[in-house]
Image (cartoon, helix red, strand yellow):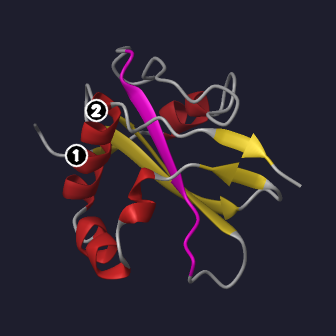
Amino acid sequence: MTGWSSFDGDQVAALTQGASFFADPGERDCPACGQRRLRAYFTAPENAKRPTLVSYVWCGGCDKFVGTRARHPEGLIFSDPLAVLDAAERRELERSLTGFLTHLDALWDSGALPQTFTAGR
């Protein structure tokens, strides 16, 4: 592994095209390398002051990623394979971006990801 780097602006723009990960949570083609290894993970931090959705989108082929924070869409409910971790375990995992993304990639390979999404009321 080379180490993670950020998608460039054009690649980030390309990530917003097509179906959302909520509607189609599977892998897709990476705008940087073209491999079908583009994956996503979403989480809603409990300690956020307002409803926040944090997303990580990465390519397991070329090791590019982007992380964003946005308003949590009202009623969006999703599975989270990291919910089994206590706060200390979660902090330790998130301490290293490289380790965190490698862990998420392993969850995809094991079938624990992608997440499932439903629009609740």
The x, y position of residue 47, in whole percent, is: 56, 83
Q: Place residue 110 in its image quadrant.
A: top left
The x, y position of residue 101, in whole percent, is: 29, 49
Residue drawn at (74%, 42%) of the image: 118
Q: Is residue 38 magenta?
A: yes
Residue drawn at (53%, 38%) of the image: 12
**Left or right of 54 on screen, residue 67:** left
Residue drawn at (51%, 24%) of the image: 26
Q: Pointer 1: what residue?
A: 102
Q: Pointer 2: what residue?
A: 110
Q: Which amino acid type is marked by label 2?
A: Ser
Q: Which amino acid type is marked by label 1?
A: Thr
Q: Is residue 35 magenta?
A: no
Residue drawn at (31%, 76%) of the image: 91
Looking at the image, which residue sits at the far left? Answer: 1
Around disc 1, counting alpha carbons within 10 Å, would you say few (fewer than 14), some (14 to 19), or many (20 or more)? Answer: some
- For the residue pair 54 and 76, the one nearer the viewer reads as 76
